[in-house]
Amino acid sequence: MKYFEANFDGLVGPTHNYAGLSVGNVASLSNAKDVSNPKSAAKQGLQKMKALHDMGLKQGVLAPQERPDMNALRRLGFTGSDANILQQAKQHAPQILRAVYSASSMWTANAATVSPSSDTADKKVHFTPANLTNKFHRSLEPETSGRILQAMFANDEHFAHHRHLPDNDHFGDEGAANHTRFCDDYGQGGIEMFVYGRYAFDHNKPAPVKYPARHTFEACTAVSRLHQLNDSGVVYVQQNPDVIDQGVFHNDVIAVGNQNVLFYHEQAFLNTEEKLTELNRKYAAQNNKEMHFVKVASNQVSVEEAVKTYLFNTQLVDIGNNEMAIIAPMECKESASVSAYLDQLVSQNTPIKKVHFFDVKQSMRNGGGPACLRLRVALSEQELAATNQHVLMSDQLFGTLNNWVDKHYRDELSENDLIDPSLVMESRTALDELTQILNLGSVYDFQR
């Protein structure tokens, strides 16, 4: 039976805006309150999805959240009509208004952690939505994310869905942005690497000072238990606190992996040599071969330049013949040091042989690159067939979604537009139609 790694990219929502909500995310803060381009952002995302589909990869679409989250405003004491609530929030709590309009659900690497059936004791694909407790605007996502994932992967014979972890920073969970799976083949048992920023119950352990460590060790172990993973197939690695304080808010900003390759910056982890030895040992025990560790030194690319260009927030994809390609943002091509490094990388003795550049500037300016935009799900032929076929990219779906964007999305959105009550109805109308296109059912609060 064949196995695949499918990428499910977040579809940019109709209220895409730059709110600058994410402390610790340099790009997000530096572009706060700029005028955004929702239509352009959605089309950039769709173009990347279609390009990967055309490369022969399995590609799907993950629907956005309902924004603004009017129910959250009501829970916080704002009352009256939608127009009145928006006006009250703008006048008395503008930061909360920006938060409930957050565009962050486009970064589906944070939607959930996924373990394939090859790794789990019950031989089902397991999904746990991330609770994203560290940021209020992201903590609004997990309930809807869970409903969307259940509508996409609805067959109980093949898929197991868990509720997100308790809504507390002790179990702060940022999802697949801090999770990487290594395997020789997608259908074989793999090694799942969980990356965390701090220990919640031991304050004597290393932790960043300037920016928060969003993901805890305790969250990693909880997800591993929920997913019925064997200890022989799991490695827990701590992020280097110093790089978190340099703007590396998730592991996927400083490292990326696929199959037998880990591409990482030398400052990415604590106890790097010890942890990579453990990873390689467990990988070799399953596959009788060693991994490829591709280390980028600081004198080749600085942490600052890696964060600026998102060199590691790239996708590493299998292109056949034991070769891989990097899916990179245009910012990598425009950086002299990063471009020079990538030119040299493809000629080295590693599986990485090609680099493809994509324009995802609307996402980059809000703080997320190509890797942020996708959730990886390893699936067998049977599991792929059991997946909701309406969410899988095709020429027809690409055309339908582009027409849907043209019909419903504004060209520009400014901070002042956030109090326009018609924007609420525009968004709901668009999302209601989208759930019909993708056959999701009633996943949004306004539909229930």
Image (tube, rainbow, N blue to C red):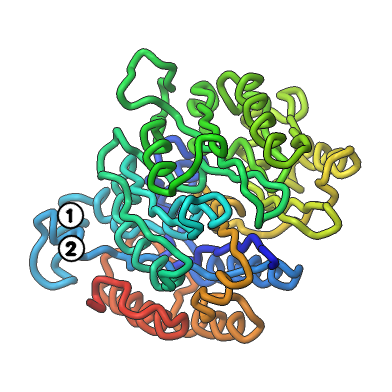
Q: Residue shown at 35%/75% (left/top)?
A: 427
Residue 355 appears at what percent x and percent y? 79, 52
Q: Do the residues under discs 2 and 1 have CB atoms within 8 angstroms?
A: yes
Q: Residue shown at 67%/24% (left/top)?
A: 277
Amino acid at the residue labelled 1: Gln
Point out which mark residue 434 bears.
none
Q: Residue shown at 31%/55% (left/top)?
A: 163
> How many neighbours does mark 2 have within 10 angstroms: few (below 14), some (14-19), or many (20 or more)?
some
Residue 141 appears at what percent x and percent y? 33, 57
Tell me the quarter of the picture where residue 215 sits.
top left
Q: Residue shown at 44%/17% (left/top)?
A: 206
Residue 230 lies left or right of residue 285; in this view the side is left
Mark 2–mark 1 distance (CA, rounded to whole Å): 6 Å
Residue 170 appears at what percent x and percent y? 29, 33
Q: Secondary structure at mark 2?
A: helix
The C terminus lies in which quarter of the figure? bottom left
The N terminus lies in which quarter of the figure? bottom right
Point out which mark residue 87 bears.
2
Residue 406 appears at what percent x and percent y? 52, 82
Tell me the quarter of the picture where residue 150 sits.
bottom left
Amino acid at the residue labelled 2: Gln
